[in-house]
């Protein structure tokens, strides 16, 4: 069986990203998907974005990725997208983010999964939504219905089964809500196989040095909403 890793929402937290990297070396996945939001919120956006580019094989953009690109073109339009982020990232990285698709698909063990971040191509599929509220996520922007979808955005991992298939969230690498650990999704199955065969889903939950991540944030005096970000890292409680 192939091992396919799905990860998202690094959000400039390189401490958490390196904790995931250690597990990746143990797992030795056959394929790695990035589901958006390498940047925003945290202090080391250039580093987490470079890590994504070096370690992942497939990419889709998230709402923060697109938002930071847009803010560089129209400074001040969105107060969340502070100039700190796009100045730190630089033009070449911004151009790369802008080139990313908003959705994709992957076939595993006879199940065709829709791959997307959540926003901006769709909604943020939170854990508390009803089954009926999950239904639109199975249909991509071209009208194709999939046997499952894998998204991110809400920063909380889950695997939910319903009549249409599997609704799955990777959780967040660098900004997890609920339990403040590193989260990612590992699927084991037959990559590219049209015939149905066994498949397994595993949520990785990896501890990391949250206090060190807070201390690194303190080294960046211009980091926007720093205290709220630090609280999220330590408690898993959303700033909103």
Image: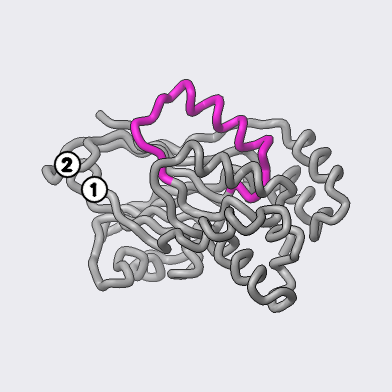
Furthest-top residue in view? 26
Q: How far from the left and from the top, in percent, is residue 149?
A: 34, 56
Is residue 119 positioned above or below 180 on the image? below
The stretch in magenta equals 10-33
- At horizontal 63% and vertical 64% (from top left) the residue drawn is 68
- At horizontal 34% and vertical 68% (from top left) the residue drawn is 135
Q: Secondary structure at mark 1?
A: strand
Q: How far from the left and from the top, in percent, is residue 64?
A: 59, 62
Distance between the alpha carbons at the discs numbered 1 and 2: 7 Å
Quadrant location of residue 19? top right
Q: How far from the left and from the top, in percent, is residue 200?
A: 31, 36
Contact, mark 1 vs mark 2 (Cβ under 8 Å): yes
Give the position of the N terminus as an image quadrant.
top left
To which residue does mark 2 refer? 193
Q: How far from the left and from the top, in percent, is residue 217?
A: 80, 45
To which residue does mark 1 refer? 107
**Lateral position of residue 128 relative to residue 85, left or right:** left
């Amino acid at each position: 069986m192939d091992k396919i890793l799905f990860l998202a929402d690094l959000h400039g937290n390189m401490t958490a990203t390196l904790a995931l990297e250690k597990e990746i070396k143990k797992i030795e996945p056959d394929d790695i998907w990035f589901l958006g939001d390498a940047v925003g919120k945290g202090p080391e956006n250039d580093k987490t974005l470079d890590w994504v580019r070096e370690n992942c094989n497939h990419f889709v953009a998230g709402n923060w990725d697109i938002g930071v690109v847009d803010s560089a073109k129209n400074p001040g339009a969105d107060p969340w997208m502070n100039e700190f982020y796009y100045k730190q990232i630089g033009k070449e990285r911004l151009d790369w983010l802008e080139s990313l698709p908003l959705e994709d698909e992957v076939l595993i063990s006879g199940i065709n999964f829709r791959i997307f971040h959540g926003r901006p191509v769709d909604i943020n599929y939170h854990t508390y939504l009803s089954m009926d509220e999950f239904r639109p996520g199975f249909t991509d922007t071209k009208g194709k219905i999939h046997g499952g979808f894998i998204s991110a955005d809400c920063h909380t991992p889950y695997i939910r089964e319903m009549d249409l298939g599997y609704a799955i969230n990777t959780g967040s690498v660098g900004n997890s809500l609920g339990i403040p650990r590193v989260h990612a999704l590992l699927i084991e199955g037959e990559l590219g196989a049209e015939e149905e065969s066994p498949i397994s889903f595993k949520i990785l939950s990896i501890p990391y040095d949250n206090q060190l991540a807070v201390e690194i944030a303190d080294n960046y005096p211009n980091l926007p909403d720093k205290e709220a970000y630090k609280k999220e890292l330590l408690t898993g409680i959303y700033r909103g």
